[in-house]
Image (cartoon, grey):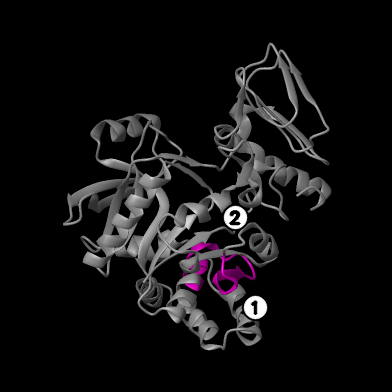
Amino acid sequence: MRHAVVMAGGSGTRLWPLSRGGRPKQLLDVVAGEDGGAHSLLAEAFTRLEAVLPADRIWVCTAARYGAQVRAALPRLRPDRLVLEPVARDTANAVGLTAALVADADPDAELAVVSADHVIRPVERFAATLTTAYDALAARPRSLVTLGIRPTSPATGFGYVQKGDATEVPGVAAAASFREKPDRQTAEAYLASGEYLWNSGMFVWRATTVLDALADHLPATAEGLRRIVAAPAGPERDAVLAEVFPTLPKISVDYAVLEPAATEPGRVLVADLDVDWLDVGSWPALAQTLERVGEDAVSGLAVTLDSAGNIVFSDDPEHLVALVGLRDSVVVHTADVTMVCPVADAERVKQLLAAVEDRHGSRFS
C-alpha cells in the first residue's frame, strides 16, 4: 500500500527568535489560512497528504521532545504513526527508522518522504504529481523517485536535478544528474535550458528499497535499525531505540542512498512538479506567507510610516511594533527577544543565535 511520512524534526534556527528549541517553526501558526486565521506548516503538510492518502497511512517523524506538541497539532494522526527520534542523527537515520517501522507494519509499503517546511499551491496539482510518482514506482519497483519543482527563477539557493530520458510514465524522467547550488550565471543557464528542476528534497520509494540501500552502503545503520524493529512495539522497543539510535553514523539520505543509486542508469527518476513552492527556511521566505501592509510584510500588531521592504513579526497581540522611515529590515518581537537586522543579512540569523548562545547559554534558544 501507499504510505507517506512528514519529516518534522528540524529546529528552524534561521527563523529565530520566533522558532525556538522547544517550539520549532513547523509547529508555529505562521501560515495564513483562507478563513483569516493561521495554521502551522506541519498541519498544512499533513492536510496536503490527505488529498492523496487516508490519515491512517500518514506518518510523522520528529524529535522526541516535540512528540506531545505534534500529537496536539495533528488530532487525526494515529498514535502508532508517530516516529520519535531520541536524538538528531541526520536524515539517513530518520528516513531509515521510519522506513523500518513502516515496513514492519506493511512489508510492501511504498513510502513518500515529504517535508514539514514547505508551502505548496495548488494542493490538487501536488496531489496529482505525487500520485504520478507512486505510479512510476509501480512501473519500476526498484527506482527512487524524487519530486523536482519546475523553476520560476534562476535561484542560487536550491540544488537542481537534470532531467534525462522520458519514462513510460508521463511527467516522469530519468534523473541525468544532481547539481549543487549554482552561481547566478549557471542558474540562468539551467532555467533557460528547460532541462533542470529544483531539488525539493521529497521522494517516493519502497520502504524495503531504502533499507536495502542502507544495508549496502551504511551497514551500521541497517544493523541498528534491525535491532530496533526486532524488539516488540512498546516500552521494550523504546528502550532499544534509546540505546541504539544515538550510536548510528550521522549522514544525510542524499549521501547514503541517492548518490550511490545515481550511479546506476535509470535507477533514480524525477517527477515534474509544476506548483507554487515555498521552502520556509528564512525570514524572507516566511514573509511571502504574511499579510501585506503597504510595502511591508506584517504579522501581528504593527504600524508603519514611510517604510518599505520590511518584514515585521510580533507574537504578542498587546504589543505594538511601530516603524518610521525604515527600509528593508527584519523586525521580530517576542516575549523575551527583539531581533532587528537588514533583510540582506537574514541568512546570518543562525550565526546570530550561535553568538547569543555563547554569551547566554540556552536561555534564549
Q: Give the numbered dot on residue 74.
A: none
Q: Nearer the viewer, residue 77 or 203?
A: 77
Helix, strand or loop for disc 1:
helix
**x and y, in percent, of residue 163 in the image:** 24, 47
Q: Callout 1: few (<14), some (14-19), or many (20+) C-alpha neighbours within 10 Å?
A: some
Region rendered in magenta:
77-97
Residue in front for this viewpoint, 32 or 235: 32
Instruction: Reply above or below: 150 against 21.
Output: above
Residue 284 in picture, x, y percent from top left: 57, 32
Residue 23 in sight: yes
Amino acid at the residue labelled 2: Gly
Q: Amino acid at mark 1?
A: Ala
Q: Residue at x 26, y 53 (%)?
A: 175
Quadrant hosting residue 187: top left
Nearer to the camera, 244 or 44: 44
Residue drawn where x is 21% and y is 65% of the image: 139
Q: Secondary structure at mark 2?
A: loop
Left or right placement of residue 320 versus residue 304 in this view: right
Where 207 sits versus 136, above or below?
Answer: below
- Position of 191 relative to 139 (above/below): above
Number of callouts = 2
* Residue highlighted by disc 1: 242
Asked if residue 179 shows in the view, the reply is: no
Residue at mark 2: 10
Residue farthest front in this picture: 35
In primary-sequence order, the first of circles 2 and 1 is 2
Q: CA distance from mark 2 to mark 1?
A: 19 Å
Question: Does the stretch in magenta take in 62?
Answer: no
Identified at 22% across, 52% down, the residue is 173
Drawn side of residue 353 relative to residue 12, left or right: right
